[in-house]
Amino acid sequence: MRTESAPLQSPAPLDLIPPQVRAAQDYETLATDFIEPARLAYVAGGAGHDQTASANRSAFSAWSMLPRVLRDVTAGHTRLSLANENLAHPILLAPVAHQRLVHARAEIETARAAEATQSCMVASTLSSVALEDIARAAGPHKWFQLYFQPQRADTLGLVRRAEQAGFGALVVTLDATLQAPSLRALRAGFRMPPECVAANLRDASRPPELPALQPGDSRIFQGLMRGAPTLQDLEWLLAQTTLPVWIKGVLHAGDAAVLATSGACGLIVSNHGGRTLDGAPSSLQMLPAIRAAVPSRFPLLFDGGVRSGADAFKAIALGADAVMVGRLQVYALSVAGALGVAHMIKLMREELEASMAFAGCATLEEVRADCLTPACMT
């Protein structure tokens, strides 16, 4: 069994789009030729047996789009406003850590693609490149994803750096304190290579010494979960910044109802790409209940399994204002760098526009639940 990941070997120039790419999801298929197998297992895998990661994808098949006729969509567009930020389209680049696993220039290439396509990029706390460098490359639409750090001073330091670098919002992730190992990655022998470090945390304080577990204590409850963020931590964060704060990792309608009154600007319906609780429902399955639990105009983003513009259409119809694309951006990055990510977004946007046009929807506001019907499952 392989015990560590080999260096990335790219068999084709990164400044060309392979001619076989005809749809956004084609980058997922091609990525197998550009990402070393153990690294691919890490990128593609979820937690445990990948049940939730697989459910994220299969959930879209439960819905069919309803075409309409005699609808004039010639003035159609995909523009929207999120947290007082005007965007050209509702496809955001989700925060994905350690992008140097698939490309030497890592998040810089992703940021260049975001700038070229008028897309909003959400940079990860665990990015391979410092957030300041990402901000310089990303253009006007950029947010910073924040993990609470063991020391509040380090958390606040990240917030101040994001503010000074010009990020327009914070995305605080609440659901990933504990992550079950990916059996796919373990079986492939994946180990994080030495060049993949969290550039934003190089100067972080050493975690404080915690009291030793007592006999009978749980390694999970009294151990790993000691660092889980609390409501008090969230309230503290909201008081530290004037940036809009999105809360990522919401899957329960009861949590959504409470968090909608917290002072956050919006929520992100997400199960962390299936990387936390294996056996959790798909994000799409829970989206309608969360939409019903919050005020009608309260902003909701969606994250989980989006591979096409049709997927984006379905998520928007079920209650999302916009969608986030995670793994697919990494696949496109591995194939053709910034050009690949930009091309993937272009294809996905056109797929969304085609779905809207066939459904008779000239604007995103017209994409609603009655645009879908349950699919006939055989």
Image (spheres, rainbow, N blue to C red):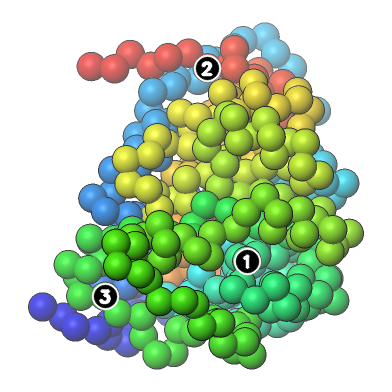
Q: Could you tell me how far apart the alpha carbons at marks 3 and 1 are, in whole angstroms? A: 26 Å
Q: Residues within 10 Å of mark 1 (few under 14, many from 20)?
A: many
The residue where tag 1 is placed is: 148
**x 50%, y 64%: residue:** 226
At label 1, which amino acid type do we have?
Phe
**x 58%, y 61%: residue:** 95
Point out the frontmost of discs 3 and 1: 1
Instruction: Say whether marks 3 and 1 touch (CB < 8 Å).
Output: no
Q: Could you tell me how far apart the alpha carbons at marks 2 and 3 are, in whole angstroms? A: 40 Å
Q: Which quadrant of the view contains residue 218?
A: bottom left
Instruction: Say whether marks 2 and 3 touch (CB < 8 Å).
Output: no
Disc number placed over residue 190 in the picture, else none: 3
User: Which x, y percent locates residue 212?
Assistant: 40, 76
Q: Is residue 125 visible?
A: yes
362 shown above or below 321: above
User: Which x, y percent locates residue 236?
Assistant: 77, 59
Element at label 2: strand
Q: Is residue 180 left or right of residue 137?
A: left
Element at label 1: loop
At label 2, which amino acid type do we have?
Leu
Point out the frontmost of discs 2 and 3: 3
Q: Residues within 10 Å of mark 2 (few under 14, many from 20)?
A: some
**x 30%, y 79%: residue:** 191
Q: Could you tell me how far apart the alpha carbons at marks 1 and 2 are, in whole angstroms? A: 38 Å
Who comes first in sequence, dot 1 or dot 2?
A: 1
**x 62%, y 66%: residue:** 148
Q: Quadrant of the C terminus?
A: top left
The residue where tag 2 is placed is: 372
